[in-house]
């Protein structure tokens, strides 16, 4: 994000060879990542702008789009840096129990609506990508226990180009309505652990551990006309590289043309490229996306954090609306990188009560840019640099605290950005906000005399 030329380079890098094929072609028999990049033109229909994240935006009706069995429970316990997921209710509808890879493949091939495939403990080395295709609704793939590390879907390796029929872990598309992926680990795939292709709607990713992806960990693609996957939820999950990506072409979550996504209470760790490269943002929602809610996440040692929009578009906006609140972002001084929060060509986005500490590796931990980024609201953010408006962007900044030091936090080096008792410049110094009713911990605001600045509301009582 250092100039228009760089943005253009990023876009070109984001367009693999198959992106140049004609738009609107039928889905191939072998699941592939069908992202058609920036060629999208068509806007959203009224139905496609229905949204379930509860954030208010003018002109968009709230809609109950999610079947009750797909609802996520609220957390029952206090937050930890490593997300502790609240247990899901038992599967609704039919259950198919599997304990071997051939059984798993068979169950997925014959999957019908209202069915959940439940995997017994163990490691399943996939001989082919698990592809859920066609007009099925309310289906799921989930581990048998609430421990996401007890069931593993394993690929051949993120740098293994001879991946056979298993380029990715799970692929959905072509009309899948309501798909749940929960309680398991997916690792070492050459392309994506999870790809939601065009025609998928309302996916839920809950309590998964994604490790070492060759490209984006979770990718949501539009069709040839630009209609994307809407109303996705990714929550209580860990998305990470053990060391680094194989190159800079990666994101934790990459949504193209999607509306109403919710990304909450996840840990993104080491979303970085090899030395000398700049990896993509851990959360990238763009290409005519809108109304994303990203809250309560932790970003550790990532080159970039959250990016709503990335480039300035001539045809509409790269993103619009949405909220970014209560996120922790920490990067150590020996890891180069860019902004922790970046809002680009995304009007009316609200950036509220985030803590972004980059150890001086980048001057503006929060940036917003391009003339299309108007009506932004940036309030109560705590950062160790400045907030920078670039290239004609316009926003209202209020009670942000710049120039934070590590002494203001409980244990910044470990990513614990809870306020220390001595952080008197942040405690009770924020602006009360109706859009922010709790903090990173899930503790209600305000505590004490008023709102605090940053993602943590300080409380001396147990549970923070
Ligand atoms: Ca307070
Ligand atoms: Ca707190």
Image (spheres, helix red, strand yellow):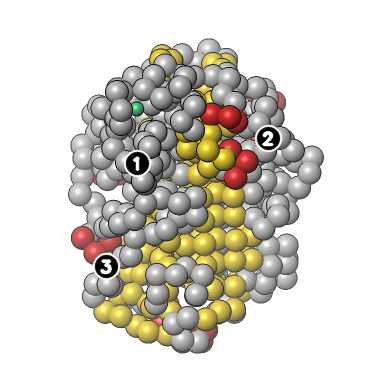
- The residue nearer to you, when weighing 40 against 196, is 196
- The residue nearer to you, when weighing 155 against 89, is 89
Image check: 338 left or right of 26? Answer: right
- Position of residue 119 measured from the top left corner of the image (x, y, whole percent): 43, 79
- Position of residue 318 measured from the top left corner of the image (x, y, whole percent): 48, 31
Residue bearing the label numbered 1: 461
Task: Give the answer, above or below, for where 370 lies relative to 303.
Answer: above
Local secondary structure at mark 1: loop
Can the viewer see residue 448? yes
Residue ID at (55%, 55%): 239
Question: Separation of disc 1 and disc 2 at Cα?
Answer: 35 Å
Can the viewer see residue 167? no
Which quadrant does the C terminus fall into?
A: top left
- The residue nearer to you, when weighing 131 against 414, is 414
- The residue nearer to you, when weighing 382 against 91, is 382
Task: Give the answer, above or below, for where 393 lies relative to 34.
Answer: above
């Amino acid at each position: 994000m250092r100039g228009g030329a760089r943005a253009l380079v990023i876009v070109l890098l984001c367009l693999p060879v198959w992106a140049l094929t004609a738009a609107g072609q039928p889905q191939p028999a072998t699941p592939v990542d069908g992202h058609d990049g920036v060629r999208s033109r068509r806007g959203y229909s009224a139905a496609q702008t229905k949204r379930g994240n509860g954030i208010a935006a003018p002109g968009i009706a709230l809609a109950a789009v999610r079947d009750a069995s797909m609802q996520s429970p609220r957390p029952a316990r206090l937050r930890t840096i490593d997300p502790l997921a609240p247990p899901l209710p038992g599967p609704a509808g039919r259950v198919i129990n599997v304990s071997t890879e051939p059984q798993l493949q068979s169950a997925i091939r014959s999957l019908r609506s209202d069915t959940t495939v439940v995997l017994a403990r163990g490691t399943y080395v996939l001989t082919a990508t698990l592809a859920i295709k066609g007009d099925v609704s309310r289906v799921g793939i989930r581990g048998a226990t609430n421990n996401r590390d007890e069931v593993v879907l394993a690929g051949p390796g993120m740098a293994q180009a001879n991946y056979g029929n298993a380029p990715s872990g799970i692929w959905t598309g072509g009309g899948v309505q309501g798909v749940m992926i929960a309680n398991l680990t997916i690792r070492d795939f050459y392309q994506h652990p999870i790809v939601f292709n065009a025609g998928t709607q309302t996916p839920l990713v809950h309590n998964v551990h994604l490790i070492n992806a060759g490209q984006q960990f979770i990718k949501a693609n539009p069709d040839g006309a630009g209609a994307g996957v809407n109303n996705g939820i990714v929550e209580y999950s860990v998305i990470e590289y053990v060391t680094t990506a194989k190159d800079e072409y990666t994101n934790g979550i990459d949504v193209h043309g999607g509306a109403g996504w919710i990304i909450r209470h996840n840990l993104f760790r080491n979303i970085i490229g090899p030395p000398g490269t700049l990896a993509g943002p851990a959360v990238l929602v763009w290409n005519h996306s809108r109304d994303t809610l990203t809250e309560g996440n932790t970003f550790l040692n990532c080159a970039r954090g959250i990016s709503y929009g990335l480039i300035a578009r001539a045809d509409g906006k790269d993103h619009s609306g949405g909220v970014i609140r209560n996120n922790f972002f920490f990067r150590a001084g020996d890891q180069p990188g860019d902004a922790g929060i970046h809002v680009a060509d995304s009007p009316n986005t609200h950036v509220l009560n985030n803590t972004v500490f980059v150890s001086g590796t980048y001057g503006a931990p929060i940036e917003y840019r391009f003339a299309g980024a108007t009506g932004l609201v940036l309030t109560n953010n705590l950062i160790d640099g400045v907030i920078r408006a670039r290239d004609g962007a316009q926003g209202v900044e209020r009670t942000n605290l710049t120039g934070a030091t590590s002494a203001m936090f409980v244990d910044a080096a470990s990513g614990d950005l809870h306020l220390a008792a001595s952080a008197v410049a942040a405690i009770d110094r924020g602006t009360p906000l109706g859009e922010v009713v709790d903090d990173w911990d899930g503790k209600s605001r305000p505590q004490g005399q008023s709102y605090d600045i940053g993602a943590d509301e300080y409380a001396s009582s147990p549970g923070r």
